[in-house]
Structures are given as C-alpha cells and as structure tokens.
Image (cartoon, helix red, strand yellow):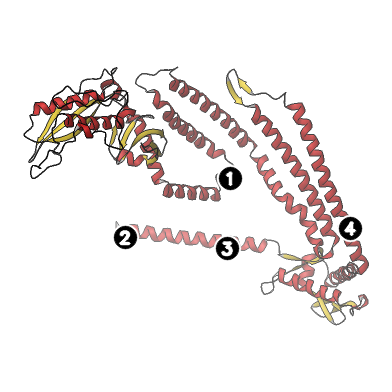
Amino acid sequence: MSRRIQVLLLALIAALTAIERLQAQGSGRGAAADEVATAPVEIDGAVLFRLRGVSSLPAEERARAASDRIVAAAADPTVSIDSLRVIESESVADVAAGDKPLVRVVDADAALEQVGRRELAYAHLSRVRQAIVDYREARTPAAVRRAANRTAIATALLLLGIGLVLWFWRRLDAFLTRRLEARIHTVGIQSFEVMRAERIRSALKSGMVAIRNVVLLAGLLIYLGSVLATWPRTRGLSRDMFGLALAPLRVIGDGVVANIPSVVFLAVLFFVTRLVLRVVRLFFEAIARGTVKLSNFDADWAAPTYKIVRVVIVAFALIVAYPYIPGSESDAFKGVSLFIGIVFSLGSSSAISNIIAGYMMTYRRAFKVGDRVKIGEAMGDVMEMRLQVTHLKSFKNEEIVIPNSQILGGDVVNYSSLAKAQGLILHTDIGIGYETPWRQVEAMLLTAAARCASPSDDSPRAFVRLKKLGDFAVTYELNVYCTNIPAMLPMYTAMHSNILDVFNEYGVQIMTPAYEGDPPEPKVVPPKDWFTAPAAAPSSGAFAPTPADGPPAKGLTVP
C-alpha cells in the first residue's frame, strides 16, 4: 500500500511540473506577442516622437538621453538651425546638429513605425528642428515678459474670482436662511421623529459649502493650468493638471456607477436598521419608566438590555451588509479588517472584561445608584454605574472609580438593600472588667442606645451581646438599628459619645483593650469635668449631668 501511495505522489508531482512548464511557455508567448514598449521624447512638455528600447538600453533611458541632447543643442547659441541634418550609413540614420548626433534611427524603429528608415529619420529631423526653434523663442526676453504679464493677470483674476465667490456665498447663505428657516420642519411619523429640522438645515448648509469649495477648487485648477502653460519649463505639468485632479474623481464616479445597486441596498438597510433601533429604544425606555411591565424583568435592566440588543442588531446589519460593501472582496479590505481586529483584540481585553463584569453586576442586582456600599477598602454612595467602571462618592466627598472586573471578583457589602425594610444594625464593642455585673453593663449600654434614638424612631429595640470572656475583660457588643443610611456615621458618633457619658455617670471604668493592674484612681471622668474647655455645655438643657445613683439623662440624638 505504501509503494502505491509513493507512485501516486510521484505522478502527481510530475503532472504539476508539466502544467507549470506549459503555463510558463504560454506566458512567454503572450509576452512576445505584447506590444513593444516605447517612451516619449519630450521638450518643454511637447512630445516629439517615441523611441523603442532593447534589453541593454530601456526605452525610458534612450528617450531621456535623446531629450537631453536636443535640449543641449537648443540651449547652445552656436548651433544653428541650418546645421541640423540626417547622416545615413549602412544600418543607421542619425539626426545630427553638425557632426553631433542627436537621435539615432535604426531599422527596428522603422519597422515599428511601418515606414522606411530614411523617411522616419527625416520626420524626426523636422520635429527636432521645430522643437529647437520653439525652445529658443520661448526663452527670449520678450517671451519672458509676456509670460510674466499673463501670470500677473491670471493671479489678479483668481483673487477677484475668489472675492466674488465669497461675496456671493454670503449673500446666498443669508437669502437661503431667511427663506428656508421657517419652512424646514422635523420629519416624523406621529410622535416618532425620523429627522430633526436642525439636521436638515445642517445638511443643506453642508451641501452649499461643498458646492462653494468645488467652485473654488475648479478656479484654482484653471489658474494653475494657465500659469503653468505660460512658462516653458512647466508646460508639461499644465497638460496633466486637470488629468491629475479629475482622475481620482473619474475612478470614484466609475466605482459609484458600477456599485449603484449595492449602494441602494446599503442605504435601505441603514434606514431600516435605524428605524428598528429607534423602536427598540422606545420600547426599553417605556420599560424603564414603568409604562410597560414584563414579568420577572426589573426596570433597572432596561438600559443595559437595550445596549446589548443594539449591539446584536448592528452586528446582524453589518453581517448582511458586508457582501454589498464596495471593495469588500479585495485583499486590501480584508487585510485592513484583519489588522483592526487583531489590534482591537490585543488592546481591549481588559476593557471587554470590565464591560462583561458591568452587565453581570447589573443583572445580579448587587447594588444600584444611590446605595451605600463597601467594595474592598472603598466605602461610599454609588454615583454612577458605567459599562467599564463604577463611581462612588466617599464620606469625604471623594470620587472613587473602581473597575467593574475588580468589583465582580471581590466582596461587596450593600448597606442600603435591607435597611429600609429591616433596618441596618450598627454595632460597636466595649470591654468591661469582671467586677462589674453584666446586667448593669447591659442596662447602661441600652441606656446609651436609647439616647441615640429620635422620638419618632419606630425601629426595633437595641440589644446587647456578650461576645467574649477575655483574659482581662468581658467584651460586650451593642447593636442599634438604623433605617436612615445617610446617618450611619453620626449614629456611630452618638453611640460612642453616649456610651462614654453613661459609663462616666455610673462610675464604671472601661477596660478596653486590657490592663495589668488596678490604677490608684478609677479611670472615669467626673461630671464636673464633662464640659472642660474648649467644650461648652448645651444652653437649652438638651444634656444635663446627673449623680451616679440618679436616673440617666437624655443624651445625643440623631434625627
């Protein structure tokens, strides 16, 4: 079996080699049958005749050398017109100025022109003689003065024409603004706006500006063509000026005409896609407002879902439009598309991960705008949720920007999600010695918590937990309900302040964190020192110190 496969492979290689040889022979015959390459001999932009080349002397080099010799003879005042003649030999005929050959004519040149060698040489002589006469005439002082005068007149006419066009444009723009301002209205279907009036006016103005620029460009091309044709050294450029300017437009025009069906299809597809996007956007805006309700679909999902649907619709439209895009089948278009795709994939990996994380957070409903959250070490209120980042406002009025991929991969604490319904539990720890009864400590902590509540607060009652029996003290935890999330920090301040006041009132020493021996005096603040300068006592009796055995006083309150 292996030998048979080897024979088949050898036969296939031989067949491919034979095909390549046949193709090479065919291309050789085609090249031989092609026209012989020639190059023009030009003097001051005028083509005198064309010369063929050979492998050792290409046509361009031969024509350039002949042009240089003719120009050198024309620039030499010692060379007279009468000295131009044809010198014939057995195989060549030279067009010469005296004894200096200018152009050599061989039998191959005559065969290409399908005339005799002698006749072709005398035809070249006539053209060379006239070219030298024209060359010298164009460089006389009188000719130079005429060229300068024509250039000055053309420049003045150009400036005058530009001024007239700008003046006429201002008048026309003012006239159109007065006549069309009140007649242009928004194009729409009932309440659906297809095109606003501002865009119509902007499109009309842009079209008028384009027409003005085309007129100015045409005038500039006419000016350059006439000025360049005036001077002999630039006469050749003047002949190609309009060709160079109009060649791209001609190519574009031919391409547009050839692709009119595709362009019409793309235009219809564009408007249909835009209409579908507008309808989809109105639908999701109605969901966001609550006008349209879908089961198991939160209103907060409307905006991100619309963005996803928009991307899908645009991607589908691009897939449909791709075969109809002019030039989409060319290698250049495919190469540029591949390059853009590679650059996008290499440079946007982190951006795409953040976008995906943003959508996942939206549908997971971890938090929403206005919630107070803690993300890693950052804590604040959610200001804005974007596709790639989330903005927080800290308690110090700092804006914190966190990538969505970092949020998705970390822990998020939401203080607001359950606060309104069940209340957020604020807690703080305190260490008290074993010699103080735990019931007394619990009562004092509840007294401090009661001072934090406002009279209208109907949240659940505070409670105390005994967290730990430590080596030196008992650790108690005070838990206070809070339904007003923006008051978290003032609430913590009120809790700590009232705890200090209540324990000072009853002469109980706070042992946190720990101690190694009893001090000579208890570490408490007597009531007389509670408002030591610079502290000032309240003037309206909002806080009044009482003896250690008296009833607790009303403390700090948080609205």
Mark 2 vs mark 3, foreground winner is 3
Mark 4 vs mark 3, foreground winner is 4
The residue tagged 3 is 25
Query: In the visual, does 525 lie left or right of 298?
Result: left
Q: Quadrant of residue 213?
A: top right
Residue that sits furthest to the bottom in the current view: 99
Instruction: Sort mark 1 into few (<14), some (14-19) or many (20+) by Cα contacts within 10 Å.
Output: some
The reply to whether the C-beta atoms of the residues labelled 1 and 2 are less than 8 Å apart is no
Q: Which mark is residue 3?
A: 2
Q: Quadrant of residue 551?
A: top left
**Disc on the earlier residue, 2 or 4:** 2
Mark 1 vs mark 4, foreground winner is 4
Helix, strand or loop for disc 1:
loop
**Disc on the earlier residue, 3 or 1:** 3
* Residue type at the position of mark 1: Gly
**Disc on the earlier residue, 1 or 2:** 2
- Quadrant containing the N terminus in the rendered view: bottom left
* Residue type at the position of mark 2: Arg
Query: Between residues 14 and 459, which one lies in front from this camera angle?
Result: 459
Q: Residue at x 68, y 40 (%)?
A: 257
Q: Residue at x 53, y 26 (%)?
A: 278
* Residue type at the position of mark 3: Gln
The reply to whether the C-beta atoms of the residues labelled 1 and 4 are less than 8 Å apart is no
Label 2 to label 3: alpha-carbon separation:
33 Å
Label 2 to label 4: alpha-carbon separation:
87 Å
Label 1 to label 4: alpha-carbon separation:
45 Å
